[in-house]
Amino acid sequence: MLIIVLFMIAMAAVAGWWLSRQGLMAKPWLEEGLAAAAPGTGAVVPPVAKVGLGVFLAVVGSLFALLVSAYSVRMQGSDWRPLPVPVLLWLNTALLVLSSIALHWARTGARRGAMEEVRAGLAAGGVSALFFLVGQLMAWRQLDAAGYFLASNPANSFFYLITAVHGAHVLGGLVALSRTTVRAWTIPEASRVRLSVDLCAVYWHFLLGIWLFLFALLAGWAGDFFVICRQLLS
């Protein structure tokens, strides 16, 4: 429960900052300049897709908060036997970081109208993310070969569940990224794919942040954080 509350507070802060940058807090009667989607008001209205993505990320974040909370509670059981984190996860993490950097490069290129950078960034980001998923499957096979089966221990079950849920979101993002990449190779104007690239980059940065926290959790580094939080709120 503690983790859920802390995560919700963090999500509310991030959501407030993100929405303020989209212009939702603008006061039309005080704005001057060109109107965007609200003619005659001067207010800058964000695309519906951006608002939708923000809501979706809040829901996804809540899902992972529930998983982390359940993990932190279940790990207190006497039958909990932590499994060793495969070394391959370090490489997978580096691949996801590289993918996020590539998407940021594509986003910057789209803002500057440099289509070559957009195409290269999207392609590099997609390939890196695909290799990340392949690496996760290989890590699963390594654990299975070492005898760490899904149902043999609660820690094993949580490891497979958490990495599977995160991998499913990466796979879903790859579908959207693939569509954006195809559009980028068929449309010469960067302005026409800028919104799609922005959405992909924001989603990828979000997935990276979630994975870094999950990795720290699975590796056992987040245990001290849980203890400190319980002491502060006790």
Image: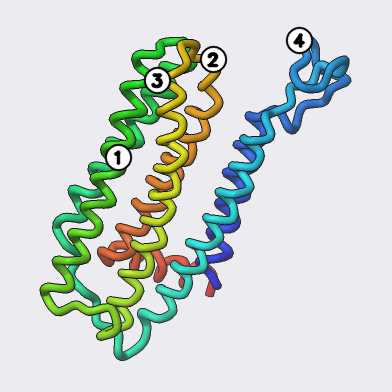
Viewer-side residue, 138 vs 219: 138
Nearer the camera: disc 2 or disc 4? 2
Residue 131 lies, with reference to residue 219, above or below; the image says above
Question: Looking at numbered disc 4 in the image, what kind of residue is underneath it?
Answer: Leu
Q: What is the number of the mark on residue 137?
A: none
The N terminus is located in which quarter?
Answer: bottom right
Instruction: Answer left or right for 157 relative to 229.
Output: left
Locate residue 125, reporting x and y percent: 32, 33
3 or 2: mark nearer the eye: 3
Viewer-nearest of discs 2 and 1: 2
Rendered image quadrant of residue 22: top right
> Tag 1 or tag 2, which sits nearer the N-term?
1
Q: Secondary structure at mark 2?
A: helix
Tell me the kind of residue under disc 3.
Trp
Identify the amino acid type marked 1.
Answer: Val
Classify mark 2: residues with Cα within 10 Å, few (<14), some (14-19) or many (20+).
some
Question: Quadrant of residue 128 in the image?
Answer: top left
* Pointer 3 or 1: first along the chain: 1
CA separation, marks 2 and 4?
Answer: 18 Å
According to the image, label 1 marks what residue?
97
4 vs 3, front mark: 3
Task: State the CA–CA distance, disc 4 to disc 3.
Answer: 31 Å
SS of the residue at dot 3? helix
Which comes before the other along the chain, label 2 or label 4?
Answer: 4
The residue labelled by disc 2 is: 191
Residue type beneath disc 2 = Ser
Q: Are marks 2 and 1 in contact (CB under 8 Å)?
A: no
Q: In the rendered image of this protein, does residue 85 appear above or below residue 96?
A: below
Mark number displayed over residue 185: 3
Q: How is the image coloured?
A: rainbow
Q: Name above or below for residue 154 compared with residue 111.
A: below
Residue located beneath label 4 in the image: 34
